Image: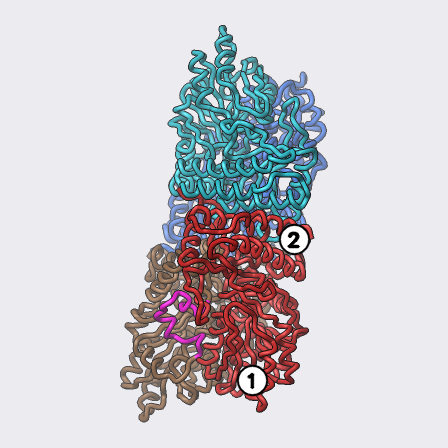
Chain colours: A cyan, B red, C brown, D blue
Amino acid sequence: MTLAHGRPLRAIPGPSILPDRVLRAMHRAAPNIYEGPLIEMTAEVSRNLRRVARTDGHVAMYIGNGHAAWEGALVNVLEPGDLALVLVNGRFALGWSEMARALGIEVELLDCGTEAAADPARLEARLRADTDGRIRAVLTTQTDTSTSVNNDIAALGAAIRAAGHDALFMVDCIASLACARFEMDAWGVDVMVAGCQKGLMTPPGMSFAFANDRALARRQTMTRVSPYFDWLPRFHPAMYYQNFCGTAPTHHVYGLHEALTMILEEEGLENVWSRHEAMAQTVWSAVDVWGETGSIRLNVPDPAHRSVAVTTIQTGPGEAERLRRWCEDRAGVTLGLGLGMGGAKSPPGDSIFRIGHMGHLNPPMLLGTLATIDAGLKALGIPHGGGALRVASETMARVASA
Amino acid sequence: MTLAHGRPLRAIPGPSILPDRVLRAMHRAAPNIYEGPLIEMTAEVSRNLRRVARTDGHVAMYIGNGHAAWEGALVNVLEPGDLALVLVNGRFALGWSEMARALGIEVELLDCGTEAAADPARLEARLRADTDGRIRAVLTTQTDTSTSVNNDIAALGAAIRAAGHDALFMVDCIASLACARFEMDAWGVDVMVAGCQKGLMTPPGMSFAFANDRALARRQTMTRVSPYFDWLPRFHPAMYYQNFCGTAPTHHVYGLHEALTMILEEEGLENVWSRHEAMAQTVWSAVDVWGETGSIRLNVPDPAHRSVAVTTIQTGPGEAERLRRWCEDRAGVTLGLGLGMGGAKSPPGDSIFRIGHMGHLNPPMLLGTLATIDAGLKALGIPHGGGALRVASETMARVASA
Amino acid sequence: MTLAHGRPLRAIPGPSILPDRVLRAMHRAAPNIYEGPLIEMTAEVSRNLRRVARTDGHVAMYIGNGHAAWEGALVNVLEPGDLALVLVNGRFALGWSEMARALGIEVELLDCGTEAAADPARLEARLRADTDGRIRAVLTTQTDTSTSVNNDIAALGAAIRAAGHDALFMVDCIASLACARFEMDAWGVDVMVAGCQKGLMTPPGMSFAFANDRALARRQTMTRVSPYFDWLPRFHPAMYYQNFCGTAPTHHVYGLHEALTMILEEEGLENVWSRHEAMAQTVWSAVDVWGETGSIRLNVPDPAHRSVAVTTIQTGPGEAERLRRWCEDRAGVTLGLGLGMGGAKSPPGDSIFRIGHMGHLNPPMLLGTLATIDAGLKALGIPHGGGALRVASETMARVASA
Amino acid sequence: MTLAHGRPLRAIPGPSILPDRVLRAMHRAAPNIYEGPLIEMTAEVSRNLRRVARTDGHVAMYIGNGHAAWEGALVNVLEPGDLALVLVNGRFALGWSEMARALGIEVELLDCGTEAAADPARLEARLRADTDGRIRAVLTTQTDTSTSVNNDIAALGAAIRAAGHDALFMVDCIASLACARFEMDAWGVDVMVAGCQKGLMTPPGMSFAFANDRALARRQTMTRVSPYFDWLPRFHPAMYYQNFCGTAPTHHVYGLHEALTMILEEEGLENVWSRHEAMAQTVWSAVDVWGETGSIRLNVPDPAHRSVAVTTIQTGPGEAERLRRWCEDRAGVTLGLGLGMGGAKSPPGDSIFRIGHMGHLNPPMLLGTLATIDAGLKALGIPHGGGALRVASETMARVASA
């Protein structure tokens, strides 16, 4: 017998759980794309995206996924032959660097391991050493979804400025925007990329490149830019179709508009960040207890280096895989599978699982996930410390009363 | 700050949680009601309802709620002046008896308290004493949603037969159908009423009266029956519109058809029952631990007398109300409020809460509810035994691996 | 080959076409039924229903269809043995009279044929002749959906008052509310019944009995009233559940609330009436031209006696049936089939079809229906006058520019 | 007063009308993107797209719009400096050529005017003159949505082969796929691009580049290709995420899968083509009659050169704009506005309107559009020939009976 017959719960790190309201907003007839309410709604989405990013800069809204935004960021500011310094603490930073290489950009990796944030001092030192200014951009993720490492973007931005280097600071916030605090302008980020399917709670299909005037100035110097990804018409469209280089993604505009309203007008962005912080602390407190016995442990030892949107957990050999299967088949909870992290000593995928705790999430969803994992550990006889749920409940009681 | 910003979880004893599929099935254009697929779909719904009720008898499908089905059952077999014996262990049996009285039916209550099932021996004794056969019907609930008492319908049916009495046996399964095992024909139930909005996972709006041939024969003797509630055209409609005495509830037919497919064709009715049993045991195991300290306790002491669909819980004065508020406002979990139970010594509503665990439910939803309650108890400083979540997890690990 | 592969168009006289917004409003999770927004939303629906009915009186909202409202109207004001005078010009007035008979009410029919409205003078004369006041109520339809006759309710109300008779005036507006002008209080209507699935643009499942204080006073004198249909708790519910005698039809409340918002707050009730008038004139103008040759003709010769919500059309033997099949199978338009009208000389069903033009309707939908019928007549070689579409277009040009 | 209060009808040439089923298929929870049904569903979508394109070749499915597919086609087979010959008979061919230029591709336009298809003999002559093989590709649209010209792709393909030239034949079927007959392999097309939002009846957000082995061989010779648009991983993905170069457009996969099922499994592709042909003939027959008086005329005189998916219509100065406004504001029909056609002598936009008749369309929708236009012409006093609707009805009667 399986008990997996109620509402399936995806506790994966994206695509995240969709609010009913977002789906409902998308369930409507095709609109006119030349006139009518869609025009102003699109402008409002653009404004609201920039509010979420905390920037007075520009945004290009792509019909595309995170990879599209990666490319849309790179091709507007880096020519083939330019050197990019990539801070790597997971598979996704690595992926972005591979895309840069495929575009002809020269890449230098700054390997930060897979269990800790990048060290601002190392970045500053490297930039100081770049006396001839070869490095044109510094690339990093805020959160790497594979390892759940969170980089301190404010500190890295400060390091760049401390080094007096004019490399563009380009940050991938795909897994963190509208989850973790992010202040694009205040932190000195020049380019930021994000997608709609994580903190923004919309089905995959739109992604974004944000840029400030410094980045836009770099764009102006480029010799040739992909028309689809080109920022110029998208930043300041003279005609509506230039917003999306052609036909608009009408239903995604509806959905994203609703999600942004929930975030900005109803819950409030600061509250969204606090809620993610609260959820993350609850997860960590439980995993720490499980880890008192056996092999389970948080991938990122230092709480200050952890994502508030996803948690990567290591287990003994094969335990993660068995646990994932049990949770999904017996209980209806889908946990994130382990991705290769790109590190030399990374554990194999069957000994890693991930809990996504981003977006449309509240205590019963999170505690239900943790409790199901706990039941799975017991059912499978996987060694683990006892009392994790009590501690999680205590944490939740504390953070929910804050 | 509130954390109640993900998917709200209603842990109330109905209307129960709606599967997305049911809502999706209802999201469609109005059909023709004279021809086309709706005709056969309605017949299939009728057949499937009888499969769920485990009867070869008849079913009247009402556009209405549980009260409509109550009336639809009474007026077809009981004349004003007839005597009905009502086994009462909660507000809903009482409500049915009040409706009978309002219809002119004479009512005798057999008070079974609010914390235990009816005693078949008492019923048998009462019927044996009715030597002149004044009692025309015995009315009871399978589950009374206010108290969460579950009556042993098989045993009560056997008691009636043991007494050699020909009273009709009429059972309200509104809160239990497709949750708790129920075998209409095998258990000798003559009339059964149910609604679509609990175990049948469909928005409120349809209810049902099932009857066997014995009940139908009684109907044939009635002098005058409400045309809307009359069984005769509904049991064997010559024209489609007679199924519903007029226009069909088209969208409810769509939704209910989908829900019945999930129950009968996909999960299987026996599995549905087992799942509810598993969920209930998990709830009970947690509440028992909470009750080790303080005032919390299950309303029904004997596990054999408990509903598998809803659990009524007593607390110290006002604790239930505070807990309900915290869970809803801080965490997004709506618990069932305490209804007056109709008993002389019933606790006030603010010292009762109820957990609905019926229908579209799986481990993360249930464990998430229990864990949120646990967090609420801690946050509010309500005395409770420690370790309830560990025990719930152990229970779930066991039942989910069965 | 069939061309019936786009959006099917139901041109049937109910259930009428559902606005996407109504369906979207219904696509949501089950709410709490004891607290929260549903409570006020229900009160607003009740208020808005009375605005649509143009009454300061009361409304009972039933989970039910039109037949339920029929019964809900009858049992609250008429005892078995009371005499009701029923003005009949179609199957539905007849149906209501049959229900009254089944409830033990004595019925006298005033046969008005099937092609014309009731004559107020005849009604007045009959009431004047009732010197001992045996007639307790006058029943009529505003629109009879089978014949598409529309009675002049204002004139009939005036006739009752002119006769100085105190019979209650009870009107079935199921097929006309929110289509044809109706002024309950101004016209002296005591009881009115309606359903949600026609002019109110909501899936079938709710129906209504409106009453003024005169009718309510009659209710107070009744000896016994069906608890389900009883007006008293429904008119002035002390507890929320009394609104619906039990569980509320949550999703219908959502849908109906949206539809009433569209009618009252957005389009405006007067505009809704004008739009129906405009659509009806367009239909009539086309049918008149078709009828210049062959057997096609409007069932109701006098425009003043015609419904603005549905049009019944007679054809030569079998032509209607062939035309309906062609329109549905080849073109995706479902026309209303011919119901027996209840008249002695009524044509057979295969020589009648009906066009529903109620509710969510605009020029392309109506003209598309007429043009498809026109194509069907041509394809099938059914004799008809030429130029009907030109005339319909002229009519539409005129009314749409008003 | 406006009558625009029923279901709005978009008669625009895309995004086309969405079947309710497609929207319903998209209204569901976010799935796992690493395992489960989405994986096979995506493979089936890929297979079915190739069936619709009538090719045994390859398809790259982009999250993107038509412009994305344009770029996705160009960058895989043409290097900067390569020469492309573009057959232009409308704005969209011109747009594709401009994109090519922006990518550094050299472009030669073969201007075919805006009212007729490209002449295969001219193409053949030009290719024969290219004795040193400078032309690397021939680009054309099947249907140009601005002018509604339809090119004879089979004949153009034959011309290329007759010239013995090895230029790749690249065709934009964005406005015609699943509307007009198209046989990629049989007609010798090497590369074809399409979008999901026209004949494929899915909200905008996916587009496609199809290629045969000849085109794939060209890809293999390219020095550097945009990673996002690169065909190689997309044609033969080793990992699921390579299908979409990152996160899959989950909900578009659901919607498109449903639409393809409707096209291929239910209606049948040949029937889809026939239905579009039937609808187009009906439109043309009406417009021809309107044109008998006044300034209205079909943009494309020769029926053999006309699109079956969209019809561009010229009017007297400003008439089109007034007509569009009336139809939308008074009647709820949105007509396509006039786009600049890119031709030297093109009429201004306010003297052009377009009727989209692609995708999810049946007789009442099309005839309703034509009749509403007819009413608008009358209401506005725009000169037009009389009897257009009669002729349209006759045409429809004929084609629907075929």
Mark 1, Cα crowd under 10 Å, few <14 / some 14-19 / many 20+, is some
The chain containing the residue under callout 2 comes to B
Instruction: Please give the name of the residue rendered at 46% of the width and 81% of the height, measured from the top-left corner.
Output: B101
Amino acid, disc 2: Val
Residue C103 appears left or right of A147: left
Q: Secondary structure at mark 2?
A: helix
Residue B92 in sight? yes
Q: Which residue is mark 1?
A: B136
Up-down relation of residue D383 to residue C244 (above or below): above
Nearer to us in this view, C57 or B196: B196
- Residue, far bottom: C132
Q: Position of residue D60 (x, y in %)?
A: 64, 33
Nearer to us in this view, A32 or A290: A290
Label 2 and label 1: CA atoms lie apart by 42 Å
Nearer to us in this view, A385 or C173: A385
Up-down relation of residue C341 to residue D199 (above or below): below
Q: Position of residue A111 (x, y in %)?
A: 58, 18
The chain containing the residue under callout 1 comes to B
Q: Nearer the viewer, mark 2 or mark 1?
A: 2
Q: Which residues are magenta?
A: C226-246
Place residue A115 in its image quadrant.
top right
Q: Residue B399, which numbered label?
A: 2
Q: Earlier in the sequence, mark 2 or mark 1?
A: 1
Nearer to us in this view, D110 or A389: A389
- Residue, far front: B293
Mark 2, Cα crowd under 10 Å, few <14 / some 14-19 / many 20+, is many
